[in-house]
Image (tube, grey):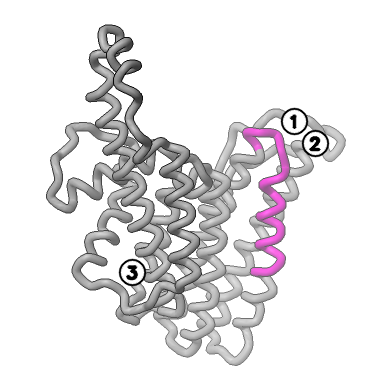
Amino acid sequence: MDSNLFSRRRAERFAQLLDEANGGRRHHVRSRADDQLATLVAVGRRLTVAPPAAEVAPEFRTGLRAMLMATAEREGIGAPAEPSSRRSADAGRNRLLPAVTARRARARGAILVGVAAGAVALSGISAASENAVPGDALYGMKRSTERAQLALASSDVGRGQLFLDFARTRLAEAATLRGDENGFSAVLDDMDADTRQGVRLLTTAAAQRSDPAALDAVNSFVTGQRQAVGGLLDDVSRADRERTRRSLTLLDAARKRSDALRAAIACGLPAPTGSDALGPAPAGCPGDR
């Protein structure tokens, strides 16, 4: 099942880990994605103990069923067996195929179950915890859901865009915490960390591909985010104002880095070798020196 959310390998490994977590047979293999997927598996385990109270919309159930049925048809899950005459003709050549086919069918079935469970779980968590802020009971679940989304993103560009989305979410949380100096500063720290991660992934992708398309997401983010962060300067303490200005400085640096990379790509410079928290640091074009 290949999509922006679930790649086949990640989905297969997620199904294995979910099965193991629920007491199934252990698979003596390791994947580079295990550490990332562990967060999603933990979310699944938590949901079996304390499922969210939010109801899943009927429209979502209908859409999910249609998606699963289409995937089952495409993957051949539940397809009738081949005629006996054809099976006997191919028996000598394909003696091992029944066992392999059975394993693949089970794996595909597990993938569908895992995808369905994950989709329902994430939709329920989102509905129940999307407005949670630090200190709320569901805030940890909200952050776990974000980490699960990152683990299942299919590319660095997708992960970079998710980090920027999370930075926007942290900004909304900070707006509710004005007056709580420690909480306000901690959320802005998380917001800036998400900003750096997202910008670094997107600028790196742009430099590696010599394609400025990923930089458009950076510029769009910085424009909207800077205006919203500026709104935090009103009616706050001096300490909160100083902390907010550090976030504004970071956004200005991100825009400057994006513009410098865009210029370097336009004038045909090779991918920069130097890098920092915001990604590749390009040299100026020859005419700019």
Report helix, strand or loop for mark 1: loop
* First to last magenta residue range: 207-225
**Pointer 1 with pointer 3, Cβ within 8 A:** no
The structure residue drawn at horizontal position 43% and vertical position 70%, both measured from the top left corner, is 126
Dot 2, crowdedness within 10 Å: few (<14), some or many (≥20)? some
Query: In the rendered structure, does residue 264 fall within the stretch colored magenta?
Result: no
Q: Position of residue 18 (x, y in %)?
A: 24, 49
Which callout, 1 or 2, points at the residue further toward the start of the chain?
1
Q: Position of residue 175 (x, y in %)?
A: 53, 82
- Pointer 3: what residue? 141
Which callout, 2 or 3, points at the residue further toward the start of the chain?
3
**Pointer 1 with pointer 2, Cβ within 8 A:** yes
Compared across the picture, whether 198 is left or right of 19 comes to right
Q: CA distance from mark 1 to mark 2?
A: 7 Å
Image quadrant occupied by the C terminus: top right
Report helix, strand or loop for mark 3: helix
Identify residue type, mark 1: Leu
The structure residue drawn at horizontal position 14% and vertical position 41%, both measured from the top left corner, is 25
- Pointer 2: what residue? 285
Q: Tell me where residue 264 sits by quadrant.
A: top right
Task: Tell which of 241 and 143 is nearer to you.
Answer: 143
- Pointer 1: what residue? 269
